[in-house]
Amino acid sequence: MQTDRRRFIKQTGATAAGLMVGGMSLSAKSYKRILGANDRIHVAIIGLGRRLGAYPEAIAKKSNNIELSYLCDVMPSQLTEAAALFDKKIDYKARLEKDLRKVFADKKVDAVINATPDHWHAPGSIMAIREGKHVYVEKPCSHNMFENELLVEAQKKYDRVVQMGNQQRSSFHTIQVINAIHNGEIGIPYKAIAFYTNKRGRVPVQKPAPVPGGLDWELFQGPAPRRGYTEETWNYNWHWYGWDYGTAEAGNNGTHEMDVARWALQVGFPNRVDVDATKGQFLDDGWEMYDTMEATYKFDDNKSIKWSGISRNGYDTYGTGRGTIIYGSEGSVYVDRNKYMIYDRKGGLVKNNESDSEEAGTALGGGGSTSTLHVENFFNSIRDTEKLMAPIADAAVSMAMVHYSNVAYRINSGFDIDPNTGKMLYQDAMKLWGREYEPGWEPVI
């Protein structure tokens, strides 16, 4: 399966004209970029939390010729745990560092995997790009629309390879079914439902607390406005404690399925967003934003996407925990991280494809074969031997859908959007285009 996927990527990613290098067609510019492509890529990982499991296989694989130069985190216990994990995979030791700025300053580092909390994704990636690094940035690639645009501008200005961690773009069975949709398998696709269901529990109410031992709270906050530490914040609950650090469930998980929906429908920015969202569970706990959301996005040509995110009620409305349903004039498709099913217009099953993917679903943590392929695609794109599956200029359009839904929730109003520029055509919405930054930490290119 993996060999077939690689053949597919190379066939679809080869340049139409240019120099022939190693059997591949490359432009003169690309040829200059890959001089020394067989050299080792020196990689640093910043942020060693629950997504760490997505990277060891790709880094340790000998044929990828990767050297792990740094493991970086603001919490010493995570540095120790990450080092122990990689001790089982590689026969050398990466340097341990808490300050990402020192990692970026090292000229020997070629590429950075950015798995920090959401508020560090764009600012940290932009800092790395400015230092000449290629960047694999986990979703969500930005905390707000200002950062979303700035990250794309930085990639263009410094001409680096920048990939978002929406790993389903590297899923072979998903690529197959999206191609089938684009080739007319279900007629004209006009609507998609992207959904996520989980059974998250009660979250502690925030209370002032001492900073956990060893945690560099200043560096954790980074570009975010300063505040005192509250218990349970640094270890995942920052997702739900207001908007200083997180992007709620739409950014945490909806990014993936909304991206697949947009990919299937071949749409860009929407022209309208409307949201129905509320906190429906554990009304007295510390969760500070919606835990239930339905967002509807309208696009040109009468196309639409619905995002259904239910974080804390385990009823599977669509039969599974997460996935995407695409409706067409002649049939429909269901696709998730492990399979796809194609139906005719009368609802009869036409094709059922069970993948050998072992990608994590709704459980905390991450990793699996699709994540490994996506990271390898990033490495191979640096060498110009594969087409980048989730280039940031395209991924940022999917990311914008997250920001639109969060803004609509926060102002309690839907709004129109300019589909050419992505600008929100509503004054109250544009007040949330960016955010307040701690002085001296503002992202710049």
Image (tube, rainbow, N blue to C red):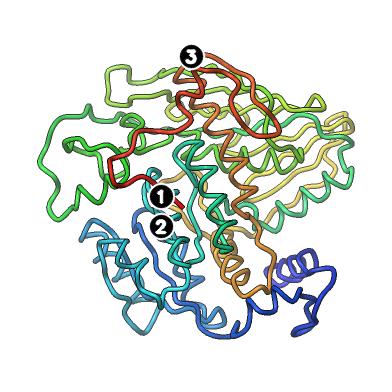
**Depth order, front residue of 91/383:** 383
**N-terminal-most mark, 3 or 2:** 2
Q: Residue at x 74, y 37 (%)?
A: 267
Give the x, y percent position of residue 105.
Answer: 35, 69
Give the x, y percent position of residue 397.
Answer: 62, 41
Q: Residue tagged by mark 3?
A: 412
Calculate the distance from the C-alpha at mark 3 to the C-alpha at mark 2: 34 Å
Quadrant of the snapshot with the N terminus? bottom right
Q: Residue tagged by mark 1?
A: 123
In this view, the residue farthest toward the top is 413
Calculate the distance from the C-alpha at mark 3 to the C-alpha at mark 1: 28 Å
Label 1–label 2 contact, CB within 8 A: yes
Quarter of the figure with residue 396? top right
Q: Residue at x 62, y 55 (%)?
A: 391
Q: Left or right? Give the position of 391 relative to 284.
A: right
Q: Residue tagged by mark 2?
A: 127
SS label for mark 3: loop
